Image (cartoon, rainbow, N blue to C red):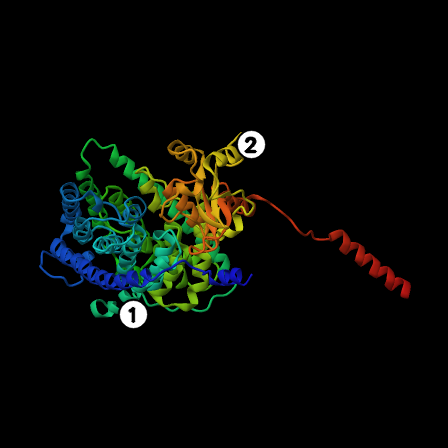
Amino acid sequence: MNKDNTRHDARRDFATDSRLLRIAAIAAVIGLLSTIAAYILLHLISFFTNLFFFQSISDLSRSPASNTLGAWVIAVPALGGLIIGLIARFGSEKIRGHGIPEAIEAILFGNSKMSPKVAILKPLSSGIAIGSGGPFGAEGPIIMTGGALGSLIGQYFHITGAERKTLLVAGAVAGMTAVFGTPIAAVMLAVELLLFELRPRSLLPVAIACAMAGFARPFFLDAGALFPLQTAPVVLVDLVSCVIAGLACGALSWILSSSLYKVEDLFGKLPIHWMWWPALGGLAVGIGGYLQPRALGVGYDVIGDLLQNHLALGVVITLLTCKALMWVIALGSGTSGGVLAPLLMMGAGLGVVIGPYLPGAQPALWPLVFMAATLGGMMRAPVMSVIFAFELTHDINALLPLLAASAVAYGFTVLTMPRSILTEKIARRGHHIYREYGIDPLERQNVAEVMTRKMQTIESDTLIDEALHTHFGQLQVHRAFPVVRDGCFVGMVDREILLTGQASASDRRVADLFGANVPIMALPEETCRTISTRLAVHGMERLPVVTDPQSRRLIGIVSRSDLVKPSFTLFAEEHQHERFRKIPFGTLKRRKTTAAEKIDSSI
C-alpha cells in the first residue's frame, strides 16, 4: 500500500529529463543568432531599396514611395521578380513562398532538416523581392531564415528529431521577435502554428530563445513599440462593433485567401516555366506602385499612419485596393516575401474605411482592432494576433476589443474555410495538416489503470512438453503466457518458442529457454503511450507489468487491446450527449400557486 502511494506521488505533471537544459542553452544561442539574422535582413531590404529605386549604395531606411522614377517604376519590381525566379531555379526552390508554410512542412514532413542554401538564399531573395517594391513583410523570410539557422545548428548535435524541431521553431520565432519586438506573441505563434504540441521540452527552449532575442534587439534595432498607440477605455456598445469588425475581417480573410490560390492556379496554367512567374507578378506590382506608390515595399510607415488616422479616406481606399491586388498577384506568382505586414496594412485600412460607421465614439480604436482580427482570422491564431497587436502598440485599453474581434474572425474562418492561407499551400503539395491537438488519451492513463491483473502464468521449472499440453492445447485461451519463478517474471513464451525448445531436447524446462538478457517489461506508473511505442518498436503484442526492474515481481499483463481502453473514455467525452438536470418550470409554477394559496388562506 505504501509502495503504491509512493509510486503514485512520484508521477509528474510533465515528462522531462536533464536534456531539456542542454536544448534550452542551445536555443538561447540560436535566439541571439536569429536577432543578428533579422538585423542583416532588414539592412538587406534597405540596401536593395536604395539600389533599385534611388540608384545609390546605402543601407539607410527609405520608403520606395519617394522615388522619382516615374513610369519606369513599373519595371523595377519586374526586374526583382526576374532575379528571384533565377535564384529559385538555379539556387533552391525552397525560397519561393512566404516562409511559414515552408517551415511547417519542414517540421512535419522533413524531420526538421533545412539546408544551408535556404539560410543564405532566403534572406537574399527576400531582400531583393521587398527591396524592389514587393508588397511583403520581413517576418516570413526571417521565420524561414531563423528556422534554417536553428535546424542547421541542431544538425551538429546528437539530438532527436523532436529536439531539432524545437530548435528550428526557436530560431524562427526569435527572428520574429527581433523584427517586431513582440516576444510573447512570437511564443504564441510557436504554440498555435509551429510546435504542434505544448510541452516543456519545446515551450521552454522557445520561450528562452524569444527572451534572448528580446533582450538583444535594442543592441541591433530600435527599442520600444513599433506603432505606439493609446486609446480610451471601451464601453458596452463597442462589443457590437467588435462583432461587426470580426465578421468583416473574417470575410476579408476568406476573400484574400481564396483569391490568392485562384491566382496561383492561373499562374500554373501558363505555358511558361515557373521561373518567369515572379517577373510577371512583379509587373503587376509595378503597375500598382505607379498608381499608388505607398503600396510598394513593407510599408511599416503606412501602417503607422493608418493606426493614427493620418490618411484621407480616398487615399486609404486606393491604397487598400492596390495593396490587396499587388499582394495577391505577387504572392501567387511564387516570389519570396512575408504575409504579416501586408495583412496588418490591409486590416488597418479596412478599419479606417468601416470604423467611422461603427457604434461607439473611438475612431482611433478600429484600425488596430481590424488589423488584429484580420491577422487572427487569416492565420487561425487568435491569441497570437491579440498579443501581437498589443505588443506592437502597448495599448492596454484595446485588449478586450482585440480579443472579441479576433475571436469572431477566427470563428468565421474556421466555419467557412477548410484550411488557412498557410496550410492550403501545404495541402496542395499532398500533405494534409490537422491543427487541432490535445492531450493524448494514452498519456492520460498509466499502465496500472488498464492492465489485466488476473492472468495465467507458467512456472519456470515446468517441462516444455507439459507447458505445451497444459497451456497450448485445445483449451488455449491466450497466445502467450508469462513465465515466473517465485512470483518474479522470467520471460514470455508462445507456442512457437516452446516448439523450438522442444525440438532441441524433450526433457528441457521452460526456464532453459531464457538467457541472461533482460526481458522487455512495463512498469505500472508508465503511461499507455510509452507502452504503445515500446510494443510497436519491438513488434510485440503484450508486455508483463512488474513492480520494479530489480525484483521483477509480476503484477499484470498489458496488451494492445488494453491500450484501446483510454479511447473509450475519449469517445464518451466527445460523442455521448447527456443532460443531468432539467429546469423545473412546472415545479416552479406549482410552487408559486401553492404560495399564493397559503397567502389567501392566511388572509
Name the residue at the front extreme.
507
Q: Residue 364's spot in the image, x, y percent?
A: 39, 64
Mark 2 — residue?
475
Q: CA distance from mark 2 to mark 1?
A: 78 Å
Residue at image coords 30%, 59%: 303
Residue nearer the viewer, 542 or 53: 542
Residue nearer the viewer, 249 or 492: 492
**Dot 1 crowding, Cα within 10 Å, few <14, some 14–19, many 20+:** some
Residue nearer the viewer, 427 or 136: 427
Mark 1 — residue?
224
Label pair 2/1, CB-CB below 8 angstroms: no
Examine the rendered structure and indicate whether residue 188 appears above or below residue 333.
below
Examine the rendered structure and indicate whether residue 328 appears above or below residue 33.
above
The amino acid on which the numbered mark 2 sits, given as a three-letter code, is Leu
Residue at image coords 28%, 39%: 264
Between discs 2 and 1, the one toward the N terminus: 1
The amino acid on which the numbered mark 1 sits, given as a three-letter code, is Gly
Name the side, left or right, on which 287 lies relative to 252.
Answer: left
* Quadrant in the rendering for residue 454: top right
Examine the rendered structure and indicate whether residue 281 appears above or below residue 29.
above
Q: Examine the rendering and report whether any part of residue 375 can be seen.
A: yes
Residue at image coords 87%, 59%: 597
Q: Which mark is residue 267?
A: none
Residue at image coords 22%, 54%: 145
Question: Which is in the foreground here, disc 2 or disc 1?
Answer: 2
Q: Examine the rendering and report whether any part of residue 352 can be seen.
A: no
Q: Residue 512's spot in the image, x, y percent?
A: 40, 42
Q: Residue 218's spot in the image, x, y percent?
A: 24, 70
* Quadrant in the rendering for residue 504: top left
